[in-house]
Amino acid sequence: MLVSDWATALAPHGLRPLHVVGQGMEGVVLRVEGDLVVKVWQHRTAEELAALQAFYEAVSLPVRTTRLLDVVPVGERWASIEPHLTGEPMTAELRDGDVVAVAAVLDALAEAPAGPA
């Protein structure tokens, strides 16, 4: 990411960053005020994020998943504003009950009704 001052980059959207949650190949995730996170995507376009937003709105699962509340430009990149989800990252070390929980989520995804592509 070519942003050195997140406060300035997010200010036009009324967002105040608290800290960087993580970063990787897809972009940077920042925790912002208001129980939200902002994902600044490295390569996603506004059109791709709009499709992702529509997908999350169409999926109804018995578990809490993210959703894109808004898609905004941040510098030369696009960002999604999303609710902050509590819990542990799925990259954390698995415990005994975790495999059962992941299997339940995958079963729920398999039963989710298909919509238009």
Image (tube, rainbow, N blue to C red):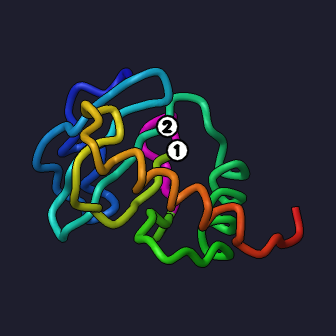
Q: Is residue 8 left or right of residue 48?
A: left
Say which of marks 2 and 1 sits in front: 2
Residue in the foreground of this view, choosing between 20 and 94: 94
- Crowdedness near tag 1: few (<14), some (14–19) or many (≥20) residues, C-alpha within 10 Å: many
Please identify the residue farthest to the front as the structure is shown.
96
Could you tell which of marks 2 and 1 lies nearer the N-terminus? 2
* Residue that label 1 marks: 78
Residue in the foreground of this view, choosing between 46 and 57: 57
**Alpha carbon separation for disc pair 2 and 1:** 6 Å
Q: Which mark is residue 41?
A: 2
Q: Amino acid at mark 2?
A: Trp
Assess whether mark 1 and mark 2 are in contact (beta carbons under 8 angstroms).
yes
Q: Which mark is residue 47?
A: none
Q: Position of residue 55 (x, y in %)?
A: 68, 65
Which stretch is magenta? 71-78
Residue in the foreground of this view, choosing between 117 and 101: 101
- Crowdedness near tag 2: few (<14), some (14–19) or many (≥20) residues, C-alpha within 10 Å: many
Q: Amino acid at mark 1?
A: Trp
The quarter holding residue 63 reads bottom left
Helix, strand, or loop for circle 1? strand
* 104 is within the stretch colored magenta: no
Above or below for 18 versus 85: above
Q: Main secondary structure of the magenta part?
A: strand
Above or below for 80 versus 58: above
Q: Position of residue 110 (x, y in %)?
A: 71, 62
**Residue at 46% over, 70% down:** 69
**Residue at 50% over, 61% down:** 104
**Residue at 43% over, 38% down:** 75
Helix, strand, or loop for circle 2? strand
Location of the C terminus (image quadrant): bottom right
